[in-house]
Image: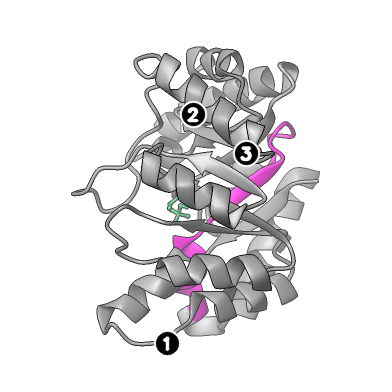
Amino acid sequence: MSRLSVNVDHVATVRQARRASEPDPVAAALMAEVAGADGITVHLREDRRHIQDRDLSVMRKAAKTRLNLEMAATKEMFGIALEVKPDMVTLVPEKRQELTTEGGLDVKANFDYLKKFVEGLRDANIPVNLFIDPTLDAVKLSHKIGSDGVELHTGTYADAKDGRARDSELKRVAEAAALSHRLGLKTHAGHGLDYRNIKAVASIKEIDEFAIGFSIIARSIYTGINEAVREMKRLIIEGRAG
Ligand code: PXP
């Protein structure tokens, strides 16, 4: 079964454009759950450009599915994770100037630091996934670091300009997912997935969960969240069935 975790950051992006109180990402998350989302993802960024601390703590109390907190591996975020106790944490690299997360973690260069960081979260009973580029080396290193799982970055697949590039990137994702699964890691995928490109990735049976935000929130402007989540879930199930 491939699960769908709906990332509601962009509901907060709209709210922050006016520093208003609506639209509320917590309300959106609850509606997404009613529509069939298996989990909710939020990224509390260092610059708080979308999700705010209040959103996270209210979300923790209100969400009925699994709450996945995406965050940078910083001391501040470590403290917040221990306080909020999400159902899982996904560690992501974070740059101030980027529009969105641009690449996977450099697990090689930051091996020792990430190992300690992951240990600290796991000691607090918080499972940790590492957001990595879909390479065999990054999967192996994540396993050595002791993470519970990985989230494979599908951004290059999503941005591929032609069929050939897309196929070759999909193959990379599939190979990384197969290795991850073989090593006993939870295997998630996300970034840039939309209504056109999801079915091919969803056909990779080793992927347990997809984290999808922008395309769902963008579509919900036209159709409402209920319809937008239902349609994505339907495509995931269809892709999985082949
Ligand atoms: N996974 C990770 C680690 C991310 O950083 C993001 C973007 O916040 C997503 C998934 C969702 O990506 P998108 O909004 O492109 O669906």
For discs 2 and 1, the disc positioned in front in the rendered view: 2
Task: For mark 3, give the secondary structure.
Answer: strand
User: Is label 2 in a helix, a strand or a loop?
Assistant: helix
Tell me the distance, in whole angstroms, between the alpha carbons under discs 1 and 3.
30 Å
Q: Where does residue 129 sit, x and y in percent of width and height?
A: 58, 35
Disc 2/disc 1 C-alpha distance (Å): 35 Å
- What residue is pinned by disc 2? 117
- Mark 1 secondary-structure assignment: loop
Seen from the viewer's position, the closer of residues 142 and 37 is 142
Determine whether, in the image, residue 91 is placed left or right of residue 238.
left
Residue 213 spot, x, y in % from top left: 49, 60
Does the magenta segment cover residue 208?
yes
**Residue 219, position as x, y percentages in the image:** 49, 73
Q: Which amino acid does label 1 sit on?
A: Glu
Checking the image for residue 22, the label placed there is 1
Q: Residue type at mark 3?
A: His
N-terminal of the pair, mark 2 or mark 1, is 1
Mark identifier at residue 188: 3
Does the CB distance between marks 2 and 3 fall below 8 Å? no
Dot 2 amino acid type: Phe
Answer with left or right where residue 1 lies relative to residue 147: right
The crowd level at tag 3 (other Cα within 10 Å; few <14, some 14-19, many 20+) is many
Look at 42% across and 39% down and name the residue there.
Answer: 92
Q: 211 or 48: nearer the eye?
A: 48
Q: How far apart are marks 2 and 3 (CA)?
A: 20 Å
